[in-house]
Image: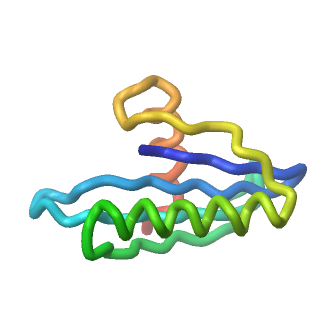
Amino acid sequence: MIIRWENEHDYVLVHVHQDMFGDWIVTRAWGQIGTQFGGLKHMLADGYDQAMLWVEDIDHIQLSRHFKKVLETQDHTPEAQDAMRQLSLLDP
């Protein structure tokens, strides 16, 4: 699952997925739109339910900061693949 929030200048992107060991990973990227300024954080969840709880928390925080959800999709859509390409630019 990939979710993206934006405001006029900034974005937050969350990717929820399982790694090759079956662990649930929540990746959060943030930064300024159109630049490579930002950050990247990976969090290991105890399970799917905890990962979804973290996503709900992130959603609540972003909406309170007046960000708008602009994308919510599964991993294999063209929109998701484009979001993942953007995310890979931040990974060192």
In the image, 38: left or right of 42? right
- Closer to the camera, 80 or 46? 46
Location of residue 1 by image quarter: top left
What is the residue that sits farthest to the top in this orientation? 78
In the image, 15: left or right of 25? right
Q: Position of residue 64 (x, y in %)?
A: 81, 65
At 59% from the left and 69% from the top, the residue drawn is 57
Q: Position of residue 70 (x, y in %)?
A: 70, 38
In the image, 68: left or right of 77? right
At 61% from the left and 66% from the top, the residue drawn is 58
Tally of numbered tags: 0
At 42% from the left and 25% from the top, the residue drawn is 77
Instruction: Examine the rendered structure and indicate whether residue 23 appears above or below residue 76.
Output: below
Q: Position of residue 65 (x, y in %)?
A: 83, 65
In the image, 72: left or right of 59? left
At 73% from the left and 62% from the top, the residue drawn is 62
What is the residue that sits farthest to the left in this orientation? 21
- Closer to the camera, 56 or 70? 56
Instruction: Examine the rendered structure and indicate whether residue 35 appears above or below residue 78.
Output: below
Instruction: Examine the rendered structure and indicate whether residue 4 appears above or below residue 52.
Output: above
Q: Position of residue 22 (x, y in %)?
A: 13, 60
Location of residue 35 by image quarter: bottom right
Task: State the quadrant of the C terminus.
Answer: bottom left
The image's colour scheme reads rainbow
